[in-house]
Structure formats: structure tokens, C-alpha cells
Image: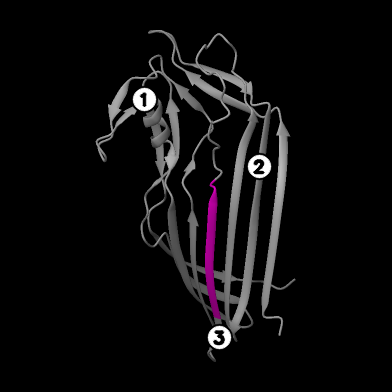
């Protein structure tokens, strides 16, 4: 009875002369050097899917998913005055998780005094680099200790870890009532109900081995009231 809809898409994209930057620490007393160069060629391919099913009257379940595979086909050394970068085809991609999925359930029912609306959303994303800036120190082999695992990390590894948002799932939901054919609506909502405070932005600061970080917004509750006017 046309209660299920499935959309699938695949894509394959090539791009030439994509610009990328690298921060390079210079000698003591000199400011960090930001070098911009072309990655020459990259390829991104992937699959995306969307499924919507009206399982019974008033209840709709929706799901989405994606698989993304980016790759540098050619990424030559940036200007030779840095003398640090070499072949960079193994560089990571920013804001491009390899896997994502989401699940949404929505229920609507007329209860006499108005229409009850319930909604829950769960979205998950693979770990992802938060920026495309590559960071190099004057001594790339300097080692620090990972306090969680006890493993030794080079400064570059530590910078990469601190500027990576880990894999995470976020749960949100809302309860609402609408009246007079949706002219008036009141909704109670909650976002990030599990209070996930992972890093969502990490910006390396060259020369001082520091990453400036921003965390995901905390658990948030609120209420909205809406009046819709006719045309």
C-alpha cells in the first residue's frame, strides 16, 4: 500500500587542484609558517541510502546511511623550503566520516483536544578529522606518552588525535501538541540526551604543540510555542 520508500545513490567524483595547508614551526623567535599548496588530484566515491516505512497508522520509521571512501590520487610535496612534507597521499580528510547512519521514529495521533506528536532521533558518525591542516614540528620524532594507554606517541600523532572527533551516537527527542489544524503548537524538546561532550573541533597551533578544542554542546532541554498564520 505504498507504505515503504527506499532511495539509493552511488557516486564517483574526481577533483583536480584541491588546496590544502600545512602549519610548520620555524626557528625560535619566528612565527609559525602556513604553507598552502595543491593536492593535485583526489577521488571521492560512496553509497547513500534512505528508507522510510509507515509501519502502522500514525507511526513512521526512517533510516539513513552512508559509506564514503575519499582518497588522494596525487598529493606532491609542498614548496621545498619546508623540506618536511614529501608525498602526502596518505593524508586524512577533514569532516568526512567513512560511515554514518541515523534512525528516526515519529508518531502522530489525534487525541481529541489536539494532535499528539512524538519524535526520537539517533544519529551516529564514524571518527573524523576536524580540520585539514597538517601539523609538523621541528622534531617530528619527539615522543609523548598517551595517558590512557601508556603508549608513546610522536608529537604529530598526538596532534592528530587531539584534532579528531571520535565515533559517537547522539540521541534527541521531542513531545509536542498541535491545535486548530496545526495553527498552534507547543513542543518540549531535548537534544544530546546522553550528554556526549566529545571534541567536535580541534585546531592545531603551530610552534607550541597545542590544539585549541571545542566540545559538543551539552544536554539541552527547551520548549517552543508556535503560531502559524494563514496566507
Nearest the viewer among 47 and 109 is 47
Quadrant into which the N terminus falls: bottom right
Chain part drawn in magenta: 97-107
148 vs 183: above or below: above
Badge 2 is on which residue?
A: 44
Badge 1 is on which residue?
A: 155
Residue 229 occupies quadrant: bottom right
- Seen at 53% across and 62% down, the residue is 102
Return the x and y of residue 199 as percentages of the image width and height: 40, 43
Return the x and y of residue 153 as percentages of the image width and height: 33, 29
Q: Is residue 188 visible?
A: no
Q: Nearer the viewer, mark 2 or mark 3?
A: 2
Q: Earlier in the sequence, mark 2 or mark 3?
A: 2
The magenta stretch spans residue 98: yes
Residue 109 occupies quadrant: bottom right
- Seen at 71% across and 73% down, the residue is 230
Q: Quick check: 45 left or right of 28?
A: right
Distance from the alpha carbon under mark 1 to that under mark 3: 56 Å
Return the x and y of residue 47 as percentages of the image width and height: 65, 54
Nearest the viewer among 58 and 83 is 83
Q: Residues within 10 Å of mark 1 (few under 14, many from 20)?
A: many
Q: Earlier in the sequence, mark 1 or mark 3?
A: 3
176 vs 128: above or below: below
Distance from the alpha carbon under mark 2 to that under mark 3: 43 Å
Disc 2 is placed on an element classified as strand
Residue 157 occupies quadrant: top left
Distance from the alpha carbon under mark 2 to that under mark 1: 29 Å
Quadrant into which the C terminus falls: bottom right
Badge 3 is on which residue?
A: 109
Q: Does the residue at mark 2 contact the one at mark 1 (Cβ under 8 Å)?
A: no
Amino acid at each position: 500500500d505504498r507504505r515503504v520508500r527506499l532511495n539509493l545513490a552511488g557516486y564517483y567524483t574526481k577533483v583536480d587542484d584541491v588546496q590544502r595547508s600545512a602549519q610548520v614551526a620555524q626557528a625560535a623567535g619566528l612565527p609559525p609558517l602556513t604553507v598552502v599548496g595543491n593536492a593535485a588530484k583526489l577521488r571521492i566515491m560512496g553509497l547513500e541510502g534512505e528508507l522510510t516505512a509507515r509501519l502502522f497508522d500514525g507511526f513512521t520509521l526512517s533510516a539513513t546511511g552512508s559509506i564514503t571512501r575519499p582518497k588522494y590520487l596525487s598529493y606532491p610535496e609542498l614548496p621545498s623550503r619546508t623540506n618536511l612534507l614529501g608525498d602526502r597521499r596518505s593524508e586524512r580528510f577533514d569532516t568526512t566520516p567513512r560511515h554514518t547512519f541515523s534512525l528516526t521514529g515519529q508518531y502522530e495521533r489525534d487525541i481529541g483536544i489536539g494532535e499528539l506528536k512524538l519524535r526520537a532521533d539517533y544519529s551516529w558518525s564514524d571518527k573524523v578529522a576536524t580540520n585539514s591542516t597538517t601539523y609538523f614540528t621541528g622534531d617530528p620524532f619527539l615522543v609523548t606518552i598517551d595517558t590512557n594507554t601508556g603508549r608513546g606517541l610522536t608529537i604529530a600523532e598526538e596532534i592528530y588525535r587531539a584534532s579528531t572527533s571520535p565515533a559517537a551516537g547522539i540521541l534527541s527527542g521531542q513531545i509536542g501538541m498541535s491545535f486548530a489544524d496545526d495553527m498552534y503548537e507547543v513542543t518540549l524538546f531535548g537534544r544530546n540526551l546522553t550528554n556526549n561532550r566529545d571534541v567536535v573541533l580541534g585546531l592545531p597551533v603551530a610552534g607550541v604543540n597545542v590544539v585549541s578544542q571545542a566540545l559538543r554542546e551539552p544536554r539541552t532541554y527547551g520548549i517552543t510555542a508556535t503560531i502559524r498564520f494563514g496566507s
